[in-house]
Image: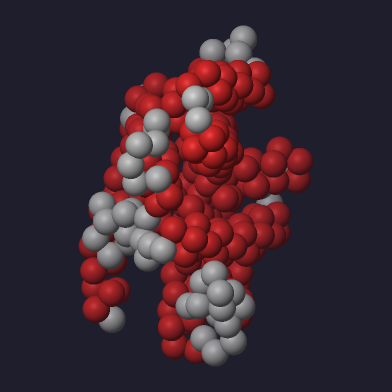
């Protein structure tokens, strides 16, 4: 309960902040703000493994190339991503003088690639959802928030059967089932709350799938933190850890929702 009391005020502030920025911020400023948040998450991810001497400005440069893919029509996403990775790879190669540097190159370039694939590409899908309409982002946030809340409360009270004992010991089968069920319920409510053109059955199915995948994001990040020997990715948000701890579900589910809308929503 003590942890819950710390989490609730931060959660309330984040909800209000998300609503105001999505609803009222002009598209360009919203893109810049989201890019900044993802860049902070990228910085936290890098610091988990490379607290010193990692050339993280290269990550921001590559992220900017990816950002250009949806702000400038003539730049293709894959071309931008490939160009960024190749450019950074060449930069590292031309600075190698010793075997130690070669080993460092393998680690740094792998970290760079992970950061771009794990964070900056999902950023593209978050902004694509915003282009479809603010209500699609509200749908994503609402479903994940309700599903996470259901998983948290049911898992805390009834959770007995651990499903990720190594990566995420607190995750239980009971919490996962609650996440799927409450997320599905939130999909039905979202059709009533937000003017989105989709049938209730499709919204319920979509929300249930998002509820499932949002619970898979936590063990993935937990694996990163355990490999680095850290409990949280950061301490910026009281009761929530860092930015990365808050955006993991959204970066996992944004591409999923985008393609579900594209291929299944009518």
User: In the image, what residue occupies the spot 75% across and 45% down?
Assistant: 264
Vertical placement of 165 versus 222: above or below?
below
Q: Residue furthest right?
A: 263
The quarter of the rendered structure image containing the N terminus is bottom left
19 and 191: which is toward the camera: 19
- Quarter of the image for residue 207 reads bottom right
User: In the image, what residue occupies the spot 69% across and 41% down?
Assistant: 259
Vertical placement of 221 versus 27: above or below?
below
User: In the image, what residue occupies the spot 24% across and 60% down?
Assistant: 238
The quarter of the rendered structure image containing the C terminus is top right
Q: Indicate how the structure is coloured in the image.
A: secondary structure
107 and 112: which is toward the camera: 107
Q: Residue furthest top?
A: 74
Q: Taking 112 as reference, is 6 left or right?
A: left
Q: How many marks?
A: 0
Residue 8 lies, in percent from the top left, at: 27, 66
67 and 107: which is toward the camera: 107
Residue 180 lies, in percent from the top left, at: 61, 69
Q: Taking 263 as reference, is 93 left or right?
A: left
Can residue 101 be seen here? yes
Residue 165 lies, in percent from the top left, at: 56, 78
Residue 149 lies, in percent from the top left, at: 44, 70
């Amino acid at each position: 309960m003590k942890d819950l009391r710390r989490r609730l005020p931060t959660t309330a502030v984040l909800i209000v902040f998300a609503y105001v920025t999505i609803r009222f911020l002009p598209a360009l400023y919203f893109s810049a703000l989201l890019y900044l948040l993802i860049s902070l998450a990228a910085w936290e991810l890098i610091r988990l493994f490379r607290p010193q001497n990692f050339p993280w400005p290269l990550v921001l440069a590559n992220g900017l190339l990816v950002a250009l893919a949806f702000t400038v029509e003539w730049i293709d996403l894959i071309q931008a991503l490939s160009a960024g990775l190749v450019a950074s790879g060449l930069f590292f190669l031309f600075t190698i003088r010793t075997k130690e540097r070669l080993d460092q190159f393998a680690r740094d370039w792998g970290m760079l690639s992970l950061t771009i694939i794990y964070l900056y590409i999902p950023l593209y899908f978050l902004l694509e959802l915003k282009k479809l309409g603010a209500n699609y982002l509200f749908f994503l946030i609402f479903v994940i928030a309700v599903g996470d809340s259901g998983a948290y409360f049911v898992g805390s009270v009834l959770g007995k059967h651990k499903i990720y004992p190594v990566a995420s010991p607190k995750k239980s089968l009971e919490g996962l089932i609650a996440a799927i069920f409450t997320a599905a319920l939130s999909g039905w409510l979202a059709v009533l709350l937000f003017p989105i053109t989709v049938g209730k059955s499709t919204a319920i199915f979509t929300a249930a799938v998002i509820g499932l995948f949002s619970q898979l994001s936590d063990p993935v990040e937990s694996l990163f933190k355990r490999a680095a020997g850290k409990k949280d990715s950061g301490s910026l948000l009281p009761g929530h850890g860092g930015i990365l701890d808050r955006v993991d579900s959204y970066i996992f589910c944004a591409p999923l929702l985008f393609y579900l809308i594209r291929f299944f929503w009518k």
